[in-house]
Every structure is written in C-alpha cells, then in structure tokens.
Image (tube, rainbow, N blue to C red):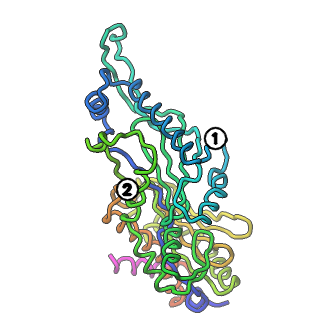
Amino acid sequence: MADYATLLRDYVTLKCRCIDRIFLQAYVPKLQSVGQVCTFLRWQRKFKIPSSAAFGKIGDAYVKAVYSFAERENIPVVQFKKGEDKEEKARPYIEAAAREGKDRVVLIGIAQEKASVWRSWVRKGHENRAHPHMEWGRQMAFINHFYFYIWDSDWGGTFWKTNAYAPYPVWLWLNGHEWAKRQLEKAGIRYEALDNGFGSCNDPERLQKICDRLGPGAVKNFFWRWLDRLPSPFTPADMRAGYVYDLAFRQFEVSDTRVFERPQAGRMWFEGVIRDHLDIGRPHQIALVFNTVVRRDTPGRFRTRVLTKGVDPTLCCYYKSSRLKQYFKEGKALRTETVICDTKDFGIGRRVCSENWSALKEVGEFANRRLCDAGAAELARSGCGHLFYMSRLEIFSRREI
C-alpha cells in the first residue's frame, strides 16, 4: 500500500479550497434594547403607547405584504409540515428556475419555529390607569417564519428566512461552491460538479483564483439586492432614520477537496486516516490542529466520532462549538471541512466585514491543512506512526507561531 503522502501527491487530479456553506443573521442594531424599541414605536412610528400591540399592527401589515407579493409574482406558498425536509420540498422549484436562468423567488414556505421576540406587559399596579406604564423583555415564542427560496444568477439556489415579529431578524443561507460554479459558467470554463463541490475543471488554476476571490462584498451585494426586492416590515422612512440591517456570522464553513483519479486510491487514504486519527479529538491534539490553547475550563466535549452513512464513513472532531469533519465524497474525493459555529471560539468578531471574514477563512484553511497536508508530510518522513507524527506536528506548530 502506498503511504499517505504518495497517495495525495500522485493520485489526486484536482485540489480546491473554497468557502462552503455560509449562514448569516441580519439584525437591526437600533432595535436591540428596550429604549431603542420604545423610541422606534413612539417617535418613528408615532404610536401613543409603545407596546406589543403596536408591533402586532406592523407585523400584520408585513404578513399582508408577503401574501400580496406572492400573488403578484405568482409564487407558490406552502405550509411546511413538522419534520418535513424543507430543502427537498423546494428543490424542484429551484431546479426549474435554474433552467430558466431568471433571478426570482421560486417558493415561499411557512414553518412554525421558536424565536426570541420583543414582548410588553402592563407594569404591576398600573392595570387600571388610563396611560399605564409598560414593562418590556425578550421572550421565546413559537411563531410563523417565512422561507423565501431564491434562484440567484450569482449564488444559485439559496433561502432567506424571516418573521413578522420584532426585532425582525433575517437569516440567510448561501453556498460558496455554488457561487464559484456561477462564476465559472460566466467565464465559459467547463467543469464537472460534485454535490456541493467540483469533480474536475478545465482550468484548475482559474478555479482556485475564483474561490479565493469570494469575500464579504459578494455576500452584502446579494443581501442588499434582495432586501430591495422582498417585502419588509420597514418603510423607506424607517431606513432613512437609520433602521437598517447589519450582518453577523452564524456559521462559516471552509472546505478542502482532493479528487482522486480512481476511487481505490481515495478509499485507501481515508481508511488509513480513520485508523491513525481516532484520537484526534482529544484536547492536546485539538490544540495543535487549531493552533490554540485548550485548558481544563475550555467548554465542549473533546472526542472523535466515526459516522457511517451507507458505506462511506465520516470522521468528526470537535472544539468548543466548532467541528472538523473529513469524509470520502461520492466515492471520488477527500473532503475536509472546518465548520465554525461561533466566531468567538477563535476570538473573532461576529460582524460580517473583511477583517473577520479573512480571519475565519485563515482558521479554517489552517485546520484543514493540518489534517491533510502536514499530517501526510510528517507521516511520510517519519514512517514511525501516529504518535511520532503528533510530536513532530507540535514542533511545526510552535515554529509557525
């Protein structure tokens, strides 16, 4: 059997590093405190008594606007059932829009889900007053959410989720691989697609440059284009008064894909990885992979899991709320993914900006590279097994710091 380094060097036909899934939350900074909420209702919207009832009127108007939009644009509206796969339900609509090549909302789905909302109640002792004082707080409630499934010429299929309750958050799901595919098509570069990835490309160097080009500007461009097209609880006057959205990271995935020339080579590599890395999730080794400190009080369960889906296993290890995942994709490619679920795990801010985007990308690429490139290189040099590899990797880590 060839060693790890030989398999990666001589049997890989395509390497591609790319931002994968991006899950963002849009929020209005001026609606995050009680004082800001009361100011909005009393002075911006001119309600005499700032209360949940006032927000209810705004929400009712927004719901009507959503249904009017769907009727005007001839968009199907469906009620999702509990446990139903929403993406599978939307897939035929997205595929039909892709064939047409027209940017549009293809489906509006409604699902009842839990969310944090602003609620008010009459202050104790003020129940019988003509102008009672109100208490305010954020509460969890099961409410209707609207899923706008969109076909976009830059991003492909995506969805935009929101609700009719203050502070009117928006959740946005995008995929970097789909963005890269659209850019290749516009440039006339032929490629073979994997599910959420690439199997081959006529110009691999150009493909990598396109993937490297993806940044927060493309994300913000998408958000503002569709905010202008979709119904909103905010009026133009609200936005001129500063009630505008900002974007924050909720999940950020960085992937590394190595496509093997034949399935046997890839399976040999991955079976060796599982055999030699079953303890990669332990604290001292997680510290090496992510180049960070793990102490006794560091939150999270440090473990490695091997998940089997069909005949292709998945190796997962965890650090705080983030995880590192490696699996053999479609029997063709080794996929390594760093999934960052909380940017604070690495001391990075949540706001979507160039600085935070670059920092998150660097963390993900660093961890992916440690598990693939550095590991294979050290094993090839040492020939002494997993424990020696980890000690050599520690020296490598210190040198980089």
In the displayed structure, would residue 311 be above or below residue 6? above
Q: Quadrant of residue 271?
A: bottom right
- Which amino acid, by three-letter code, is at mark 1? Gln
Q: Is residue 49 above or below residue 329?
A: above
SS state under label 1: strand
- Residue numbers of the magenta segment: 390-401
In the image, what residue type sits under mark 2?
Answer: Lys
- For the point 55% across and 87% down, the residue is 202
Residue occupied by mark 1 = 79
Q: Is residue 397 magenta?
A: yes
Identity of the residue drawn at 59% across and 92% down: 10
- From the image, which quarter does the C terminus lie in? bottom left
Circle 2 SS class: helix
> Would residue 208 be counted in the magenta stretch?
no
CA distance separating discs 2 and 1: 36 Å
Residue 45 occupies quadrant: top left
Q: Position of residue 299 (x, y in %)?
A: 44, 53
Location of the N terminus (image quadrant): bottom right
* Predominant SS along the magenta part: helix
Residue 344 has which mark?
A: 2
Could you tell me which residue is drawn at 46 percent across and 79 percent down? 391
